[in-house]
Amino acid sequence: MNVMKNVTNKSEPSNEAFAERCPMPDIARLIGGKWKLIILQVLIFQGTKRFGELKRDVDGITQTMLTGQLRALEEDGLVTREVFPEVPPRVEYTATEKAMALTKMFHAMHDWWMLECKK
Amino acid sequence: MNVMKNVTNKSEPSNEAFAERCPMPDIARLIGGKWKLIILQVLIFQGTKRFGELKRDVDGITQTMLTGQLRALEEDGLVTREVFPEVPPRVEYTATEKAMALTKMFHAMHDWWMLECKK
DNA sequence: CTCTACAGTACTAAATTGCTACCAACCATT
DNA sequence: AATGGTTGGTAGCAATTTAGTACTGTAGAG
């Protein structure tokens, strides 16, 4: 058993190595879930937002979820959270450099959607 | 309000339009969830696999989940399912062209991981 | 004195995901 | 003939995530 399989895809020199070194579970922990990509997309492409704006932009999300997801993203260094000691309270969220580096991935996703799903 | 934000990213002409036309919720329905990206990664970069192989490759997944996710992927045209009428049963799963088109996105993800998360 | 705006928490309900056991069908071994 | 192994899959319940609703605190407007 375990005989070499004839993988038809020739695009990469070491597909198995790629799969091995690119730990999707870890990535999924960072940007997976139902809301994180949507939140990041807004912050990355539209810049800093305060909580209420974000809630309006991310369609359908509840306060509970938004708070929770933002805290998780903050903990993973993908967004920064700035609290202004005002009344009514103001809290601004900004995508970090680490998050901005996801831009290419978003574009790849976008291109895929346009080419493969819109047709 | 709504003053032009200084988004440092200059790669695209209209970031807001991008966000608008790239419906993450729809994309998330197709490739979101805890397992789909992992399953697709295996099928895309390692080629056709049968059920048991997939279960071994996708670390930690249960039969129930694997069956369900594969059925969902099949329904969305991302994998094909071929049943061989043998005993013991053999069922093979293959990434479709639509799924193979995600290769670039996987590489973008991979690059991001290497640059931003491995350091 | 009441109403509004804003970010957030507490608590409950619903949806997803995970776990264990079980099935069918044939083969090889006992 | 009976037993156990193999493979893809299902059923039923437990655990975890995600969703929904109500509520808080503060200051200014009316």
Image (cartoon, coloured by chain):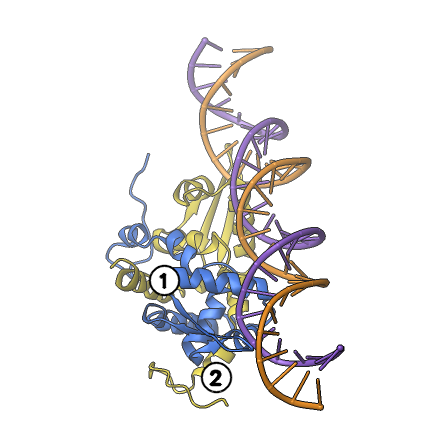
Chain colours: A blue, B yellow, C purple, D orange
For residue B106, which numbered disc appears in the image? 1
Residue A2 vertical placement versus B44 (above, below):
above
Residue bearing mark 2? B17
Q: Label 1: state its secondary structure.
A: helix
Q: Label 2: state its secondary structure.
A: helix
Do badges 1 and 2 share one subunit?
yes
For residue A73, which numbered disc appears in the image? none
For the residue pair C10 and A111, the one nearer the viewer reads as C10
Q: Does the CB distance between marks 1 and 2 fall below 8 Å?
A: no
Q: Residue at 49%, 62% (x, y): give it.
A: A69
For the residue pair A15 and B90, the one nearer the viewer reads as A15
Left or right of residue B111, residue A82 in this image: right
Provide residue B71's location: percent of width, then percent of height: 56, 51
Number of residues whose C-alpha sits closer than 10 Å to that of mark 2, classed few (under 14), some (14–19) or many (20 or more): few
Residue A45 vertical placement versus B104 (above, below):
below
Q: Can residue A87 be seen in this view?
A: yes
Provide residue B8's location: percent of width, then percent of height: 33, 82
Left or right of residue B52, residue B67 in this image: right
Amino acid type for the residue under numbered disc 1: Phe
Disc 1 versus disc 2: distance between alpha carbons?
24 Å
Left or right of residue B19, residue B75 in this image: right
Q: Residue at 33%, 84% (x, y): give it.
A: B10
Q: Is residue A116 visible?
A: no
Q: Which of marks 1 and 2 is in front?
A: 2
For the residue pair C5 and A69, the one nearer the viewer reads as C5
